[in-house]
Amino acid sequence: MRVGLDVNPLETHKSRGIGHYVANLLKSLKDIEAPVDFFLYYADWKGEPTSQGNPRFRFRRVERGARSLSHFTAKDSLDVLHLTDYHFPLAAVQELLSSPFSSVRLITTVFDLNPYHNPNKSPREVALMESNLKPLMDRLDRIIVLSENGKKDLVHFWKVRAEKVIPIPLGVDPARFSCPLRRGEVDRARRQYGITSKYILYVGGIDWNKNLVTLLEAYKLFRLDSPAPYELVLVGNHFQNPKALPENIKKGLGPGVKLTGFVPVKDLVALYQGAEIFVFPSIHEGFGLPVVEAMACGTPVVAFKSSCLPEVIGDAGLLVEPCHASALKEAMLNLVTNEHLYSTLKSRGLARSREFTWTRTARCTLDVYTSV
């Protein structure tokens, strides 16, 4: 079998979820022995990639013209083409689909339809999906999503036939997240990011669906009732420049809130492992990978009972009703004051996280390739 894989997000989205997905999927596919040759298509890279000595994986620079995909799928005699990014030019995909000489089966990954839950907050994203992705739905052979909730959204918003949609969860690297760090490494990270006490951790973005305003409100209430001082540490690229944050988030920043900005993976693992609890107040997610990363690090999780989070977390974390700051505060307080609950969720979280591996993601994706 000959498979084309869109790896452009390795460059265009290298610090975001799509780039993370493509990098880990590709790495795990290389570790699996299978009678498949991969052609890795990219367009917007600054340098020339290498195949790193693996003859089953070959890179192809694809121009952004309308006929580019047709040319390369024919030249490489592809059986399957897997598009990973809806920013790929629609004209090129439509030209490929309309070609009478092309028999390639087309697959795409849809990470989420979060913008459709509140289109007034995300008009640009909705417009881009409407123009580049939605028109392809009837022509795709399979659509990969990250959760059962993601499948439900595709069926609801775009009326996609359910049998075409295949949920495949993301994974975590156990060698990176599950191995306990030395105490000195955790302490070094705390000092580097100015953390001076026990802390509650959030990792993620600032989009409307992340619901940070509710977290900040809950933290203020938590500080009033907490038996000990806890800081709230917010990790993510958007926290690099506090002045650029949306006004409703800036208003919530008060005593005890620390903003780290971008954190490299090694430091991120240390911050996960050093945190008392991890709080994820999102109300709409495609998967919610930080939740699984936190569980893999042995950090108990509090999240809202919303979107895909109940299916990802299961009984391994505390789930509370969405958008209620008081309920979120109570859950946080319950975790830090109830030793038995804390220990139970720590153990359950570690066990739950082992169910999510990139090897599983890659094997399930291979199954999709061979089934079309």
Image (spheres, rainbow, N blue to C red):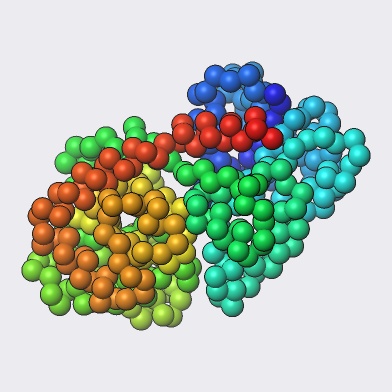
x 28%, y 40%: residue: 351
Residue 250 against residue 83 in the figure, above or below = below
Q: Is residue 51 placed above or below 180 in the rendered structure?
A: above
Closer to us: 187 or 115: 115
The vertical placement of 365 against 86, above or below, is: above
Relative image position of residue 161 (x, y in whole percent)? 67, 53
Q: What residue is rendered at 83% in x and 43% in y?
A: 96
> Going 40% across and 53% down the picture, which residue do you hit?
311
Left or right relative to 313: residue 223: left
x and y percent of residue 267 in the render? 32, 46
x, y (%) of residue 7? 63, 40
Examine the image and state in which quarter residue 283 appears.
Answer: bottom left
The one of 279 and 195 positioned closer to us in this rendering? 279
Q: Is residue 256 left or right of residue 14?
A: left
**Residue in front for this viewpoint, 28 or 12:** 28
Q: Quadrant of residue 214?
A: bottom left
For the N terminus, the quadrant is top right
Residue at figure coordinates x 56%, y 54% from the top left: 151
Residue 233 showing in the rendered view: no
Q: How many marks?
A: 0
From this view, report whether residue 86 is shown above or below residue 57: below
Q: Quadrant of the C terminus?
A: top right
Q: Is residue 128 left or right of residue 34?
A: right
Any part of residue 325 in sight: yes
* Residue 219, percent from left and from top: 25, 72
